[in-house]
Amino acid sequence: MSVREQEPVGVEVDRISVAYGDTMPIRDLSLTVQPGEFLSLLGPSGCGKTTTLRAVAGFVIPASGDIRIGGRSVVGMPPNQRNIGMVYQDYALFPHMTVLENIAFGMKMRSFPKAEIEPMARRILAQLQLGEFGHRYPTQLSGGQQQRVALARALVFNPSVLLLDEPLAALDRQLRGDMQFELRELQRRFGITTVFVTHDQEEALSLSDRIAVLNRGAILQVDAPRRVYDYPAHRFVAEFIGVANMLPGAVTPAGDSIVLDGLEGQHRLGGKHAAGAVTLMLRPERIQIASAGQAVAEGRNSLRGTVVNSVFVGTTIKYQIAVRPDLVLRVDVPAEVQSTSDAGAEVLLSWRAEDARLFRDDLLEA
């Protein structure tokens, strides 16, 4: 049987809690992964994403709650009976075994018929374009090739679910970017339900069908990458995913504009909002820069500022703009439409009302 002749299955994590002594890194966490979906668990170190992955794999036993794969509870089931493939950050390849032997090892541990092991191992090597490397040892491979071997070992026995624990972390930046495309293409080709752990927001945004953002053992938002970025449901999500400029202020009694603390002018909001203290969020690329004397297009909000610094990074110029002594904004402008402004230059910043988000009591207000 070749890889992926079976239908993909879903994963349900139902109100699990995990305790390590007196600490509980995960409490009442629930998550559903759709069949064939690529879902990333994203968050800072210690947020609970790897613990969640290890609970699904069976290496961590929840103190409470249930985990179901394909509708079947696997709590209490040993890892080797869950039909899960796993790829670790360091790949965990045996250096004394050839590539072919590394891939065959897992099948031997699962008591596959001896006559099937080598043909299946060679078949998966061919599928991952590694057919000519079967006789080599891991140390004779590049980082990207080692990663594909680790994937081949995880996929060869037709697992129901693929778990990836930061598998790109050991690669250099250029190779990591290349492998992001390759990993996503492989996942789509095999159609396998995949849960991917990362603390790298770019990886999560580029690879995922959906992203689950975690902090302190809780899931704050599960959504498509663009919605997590453009419509964060929590202030932590806004600041963790990308760069977020935060401007404190208050919605006016009329509910359609905001007065920003220490900054001149009233700024229109998209729609009506409850009056009171809020924080306005602006992404750096949503802000335009013009010279101080230039007119702002109708319908756009504006602020005056002073260039503190600017750096050219190829396609983009990244600015730091002081709008008051204690508040510096990040602004990213395409290099082809903006010449670099010198430090000290007076500028005018503008944005559309619909490009701003409001937070109230640490939750998204609109």
Image (tube, helix red, strand yellow):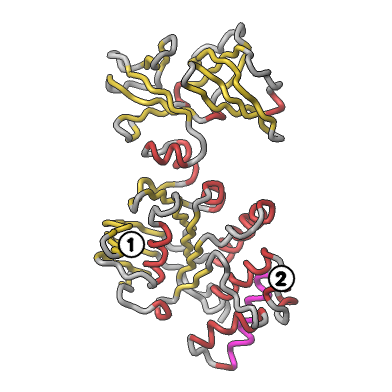
Choose mark 2 or mark 1, whichever is in front.
Answer: 2
Outermost residue on the top side: it is 293
Task: Classify mark 2: helix, strand or loop.
Answer: loop
At x 69%, y 52%, the residue is 174
Q: Please check the rendered image and state whether residue 96 is part of the magenta-colored stretch, yes or no.
A: no
In x, y percent, where is residue 6?
48, 74
**Residue 149 sits in quarter:** bottom right
At x 64%, y 83%, the residue is 97
Nearer to us in this view, 271 or 342: 342
Nearer to us in this view, 189 or 85: 85
Rounded to the nearest whole Å, what is the CA distance between mark 2 and mark 1? Answer: 37 Å
Is residue 222 shown above or below 238?
A: below
In the image, which disc is placed on residue 23?
none
In the image, which disc is placed on residue 13?
1
Nearer to us in this view, 101 or 68: 101
At x 48%, y 16%, the residue is 324
In the image, which disc is placed on residue 141?
2
Magenta residues, start to end:
115-128
Q: Tell me the amino acid under the disc marked 1.
A: Val
Residue 72 left/right relative to 169: left
Residue 87 appears in the figure: yes
